[in-house]
Amino acid sequence: EPEVTQTPSHQVTQMGQEVILHCVPISNHLYFYWYRQILGQKVEFLVSFYNNEISEKSEIFDDQFSVERPDGSNFTLKIRSTKLEDSAMYFCASSLGQGQPQHFGDGTRLSIL
Amino acid sequence: GEDVEQSLFLSVREGDSSVINCTYTDSSSTYLYWYKQEPGAGLQLLTYIFSNMDMKQDQRLTVLLNKKDKHLSLRIADTQTGDSAIYFCAESRMNNNAGNMLTFGGGTRLMVKP
């Protein structure tokens, strides 16, 4: 069964550095998402992406964050000038269409030191 | 804003049925989902229900939706030790924007005792 693939599984970064998290969505899916889960808290929506542009974003997704689909298969989340509170599990998801179920990757655990 | 709530913990004996409950506040919710998360793994989609349905059954899983009370439940029949995991309820609503964000509950940890 097709899967959403995320790399790396664990990323350790110094505070203030930039980090890029990578995702390969399911190949025929058209909608892409990023979510995060801070330890002990709920999974929170960050951003959705469709037709090469952001379609919706949450209050969390400020100027520190950006997303990109650099080629036909990858979907990246860039976090600039990382802070301690950015430490979380970041999940990528994709769906075939609007309203279709979202399929999640295994996540990238981001640790900011 | 929208909110989704779940109880934190449920313990059952192997072979019994498990019922995990969820309440939500958004009356315009269109789809409601159940995801399973095993230790160290991602969110696995278990099942989902459209808001105009009352019930959906898929093998050992039964989803019940009470739209009036904004209450969703997941029943797992003949619960096995492999069902031990965290179960997340999530809701979404259709909007004019492309894509639809999910709002998650805090997850219910199911422990199955042999």
Image: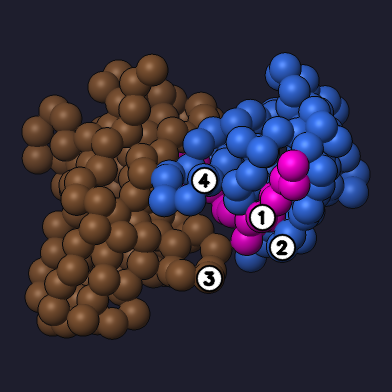
Chain colours: A brown, B blue
Q: Nearer the viewer, mark 2 or mark 4?
A: 4
Q: Counting other residues with Cα less than 10 Å from the Cα at mark 2, is it few (<14), some (14-19), or many (20 or more)? A: some
Q: Chain of mark 4?
A: B
Mark 1 or 2, nearer chain start:
2
Residue in the picture at 61% in, 36% down: B82
Residue A40 badge: 3
Q: Amino acid at mark 1?
A: Arg
Measuring from the top left, give residue A96's x and y in whole percent: 40, 24
Res. B109 mark: 1
Q: Which mark is residue A9?
A: none
Instruction: Give the CA separation, mark 1 to mark 3.
Output: 12 Å
Name the image quarter holding residue A28.
Answer: top left
The crowd level at tag 4 (other Cα within 10 Å; few <14, some 14-19, many 20+) is some
Q: Do the numbered discs 1 and 2 sit on residues whose CB atoms are within 8 Å? A: yes
| Disc 1 secondary structure class | strand
Q: Which residue is mark 2?
A: B8
Q: Which residue is mark 4?
A: B38
- Given the image, what chain letter belongs to the residue carrying mark 2? B
Q: Is residue A34 left or right of residue B90?
A: left
- Do the residues indicated by labels 1 and 3 lie within the same chain of the protein? no
User: Mark 1 against mark 3, which lies toward the viewer?
Assistant: 1
Q: Secondary structure at mark 3?
A: loop
Question: What is the span of residues highlighted in magenta in the rendered image?
Answer: B98-114
Direction from residue A11 to residue B32 in the image, left or right: right
Q: Amino acid at mark 3?
A: Gly
